[in-house]
Amino acid sequence: MRLMLRGGTVVTDAQAVAAEVLVEDERVTGVVAPGSAVAEAFASSADRIVEASGRYVLPGGIDVHTHMEMPFGGAFSADTFETGTRAAAWGGTTTLVDFAIQSRGEPLRQGLDRWFAKAEGHCAIDYGFHMIVSDVNDDSLVEMDGLVEEGVTSFKLFMAYPGVFYSTDGDILRAMQRAAGNGALIQMHAENGIAIDQLVAQALARGEIAPRFHGSTRPSILEGEATHRAIELARVAGAPLYIVHLSAAEALTRVVEARDRHQSVFAETCPQYLFLSDADLAREGFEGAKFVCSPPLRPAAHQEALWQGLATDDLAVVATDHCPFCFKEQKELGRDDFSKIPNGLPGVEHRVDLLHQGVVEGRIGLTRWVELIATAPARMFGMYPKKGTVAPGSDADLVVYDPRRQQTLSAATHHMAVDYSCYEGRTITGGVDTVLVRGQVVIDQGRYTGHAGDGRFIRRGLCQYLA
Ligand code: URP
Ligand code: ZN
Ligand code: ZN
């Protein structure tokens, strides 16, 4: 199959340039000047030409933080790998990295195999796994080495959720020491869960049961404190560290301090922390439950700090933390007690578009947009240059993006298997026209043309910022 994307502006993390993209089977084989002899010859024998004039041609988006079919507080997140990866494709994401979970008392292998069983044969786009380590012990530490060899090269630990995912500082230190030896990247959910549990119990005792108390019991100071502690533990262990879903200015300050002394500390934020706030969590009645996630949505003032962090690269990646729970049947579990509301928001479909608003509003440049949504995640998690760029030899994961289209986000039109949108009624600028996954057109001018099972498992390498 020979396919050409003609007339577009190819945008990578390095440049935006008028060029034709030549695809043969699963790979990009050329990025050539418009009108060149190579372009003309290819066009005359191509099986298909996708017109891209007036539009950008981007590397497919890479979302390195999703939770499909994740068990949480008596519910499972509503997107399966089939529905969630299809929704991702609609939004211009062609690879995701989901979190496999080790339950307490089981080997890592058992948890990882459970996630392979959920994903294999069901994904519309390529996928990899990080591993959540809920039980740090001698055996799971040894198992980490084997998983790294298999392409599962990053491990998430939690300073929150005591009794479920929580690890002590000692456990965290041991996992980091192991990572320092085997090259893995430790990802941290940095909130002080022990203190938070006290604040939650005190709030409930006062009769504070509404969704907004989810926010007030998880103050940003405790995210800053945990981030600092994680950074210091990583410093002692001599291991790199990646802070997931950073939401608070206090936490960013700690990351900046570490980076300024050249410690290998990286951080990701998510669209919800850039576009939503604690005012959404405080919406009338039980509406705020739609916005319950951890860390919680912060006062809007934090958003400026986060945009600044994106501009300076102290925040290196934007991922979604997609973890959708239906409002009607699942968020409902916490109607009389905010602490029982399943934590998580839908978002996998809208990350590329929402970050494009940063370009439209002049907060980030075009190439930085592409770096944040595709190139940096590929490098951070060992997939570059197979993924994350448009270059000869790379996988033909490509997006034709119309920067002028207006679209209004709504649960009535999105493709995620969840009954609400956090951005209901919001009109945004830009939209995906065509999406290719390894050379196969999966979104074709408003039609899904892919299949469950098109996506392949990606054996990832080590973090490429640590060379
Ligand atoms: O609220 C959230 N973020 N749910 C997903 C689990 C996690 O901590 O990432
Ligand atoms: Zn987390
Ligand atoms: Zn998450």
Image (tube, grey):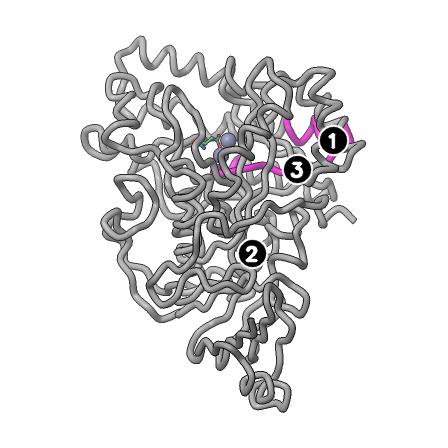
User: Which amino acid type is shown beneath numbered disc 2?
Assistant: Ala
Give the mark nearer the N terminus: 3 vs 1: 1
Asked whether 244 falls inside the magenta stretch, the response is yes
Circle nearer the viewer, 1 or 2: 1
Q: Nearer the viewer, residue 86 or 74?
A: 86
Given contact means CB atoms under 8 Å apart, are the residues at marks 3 and 1 in contact?
A: no
Q: In the image, is 27 to the left or to the right of 72?
A: right
- The residue indicated by pointer 2 is 374
Quarter location, residue 261: top right
Secondary structure at badge 2 equals: helix
Asked whether 236 falls inside the magenta stretch, the response is yes
Residue 30 visible to the viewer: yes
- The residue indicated by pointer 3 is 152
Q: Which residues fall within the magenta stretch?
A: 230-250
Q: In the image, is 375 to the left or to the right of 282?
A: right
Label 3 – label 1 distance at C-alpha: 9 Å
Label 1 – label 2 distance at C-alpha: 27 Å
Instruction: Give residue 146's mark.
Output: 1
Residue 175 is situated, as x and y percent measured from the top left of the image, at 70, 24
Q: Nearer the viewer, residue 4 or 229?
A: 4
Give the mark nearer the N terminus: 3 vs 2: 3
**Residue at 65% in and 47% down:** 380
Q: In the image, is 465 to the left or to the right of 249?
A: right
Secondary structure at badge 3 equals: loop
Instruction: Give residue 2's mark.
Output: none
User: Which amino acid type is shown beneath numbered disc 3?
Assistant: Val
Residue 411 is situated, as x and y percent measured from the top left of the image, at 26, 47
